[in-house]
Amino acid sequence: LKRVLGSIRRTARSQARAMARSLMAKCLALAAAAVALFALPSAFVPARQGAPAVSPAVAAGVAAGSMALPAWAYVMPDAQILLARVPGGKRTKELGLVVPIPEEDGLTDGQIAALFVVALVGLIAAVDLAKTLYFGINPTKFKTAKGKGSITPFMKRLIENGY
């Protein structure tokens, strides 16, 4: 039993040393790569001072090409309508496919009622905050006559100073 345990310990130690060496080699290789990255000059040559970096014709071509893509429509509110396929082919006319689009986006009565409920809750909270700030904080408001109660020194100082 002692031999088996001794061989297991030796194997574990040798494996740990091998892993430590491997890790150290990887760290040294990473450090050498970082030093080489920062020490070597960059591969790009700076442009001449007199010449423009991009010609106006290239800039105009890029601008026109980017306008042709529908990707800009994603920032608009009606992006799905703008990106939708417009019907109007032979099959569409044969089947009489028409997609009516309302002139304005309407809200349902339920949505308006929910909006008013949320606004009412906000109004009640604002009025309660205004009353609390106007009349001040009263720590004894919800205390009963039972027992002495306790108060922090900070709150006692606030009450004594009239806040």
Image (tube, rainbow, N blue to C red):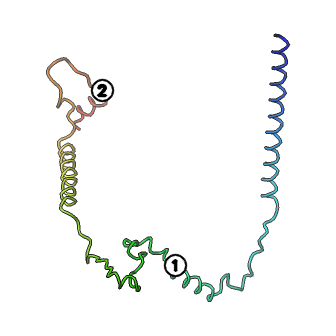
Task: Look at the numbered disc 1 and give the secondary structure of its residue.
Answer: loop
| Residue 50 position (above or below residue 26) | below
Quarter of image, res 22: top right
Between discs 2 and 1, the one toward the N terminus:
1
Q: Is residue 61 left or right of residue 70?
A: right
Which of these two is toward me, 79 or 134? 79
**Which mark identifies residue 152?**
2
Give the amino acid at mark 1: Leu
Q: Is residue 88 left or right of residue 21?
A: left
| Residue 79 position (above or below residue 159) | below
> In x, y percent, where is residue 82?
40, 77
| Residue 135 position (above or below residue 69) | above
| Residue extending furthest toward the bottom | 57
Q: Please rate how many residues cluster around mark 2, counting C-alpha atoms within 10 Å: few if below 14, some from 14 to 19, many from 20.
A: few
**Which mark identifies residue 69?**
1
> In x, y percent, where is residue 138?
20, 34
Quarter of image, res 73: bottom left
> In x, y percent, where is residue 121?
20, 50
Task: Look at the numbered disc 2 and give the secondary structure of its residue.
Answer: loop
The residue sitting at 20% across, 42% down in the picture is 132
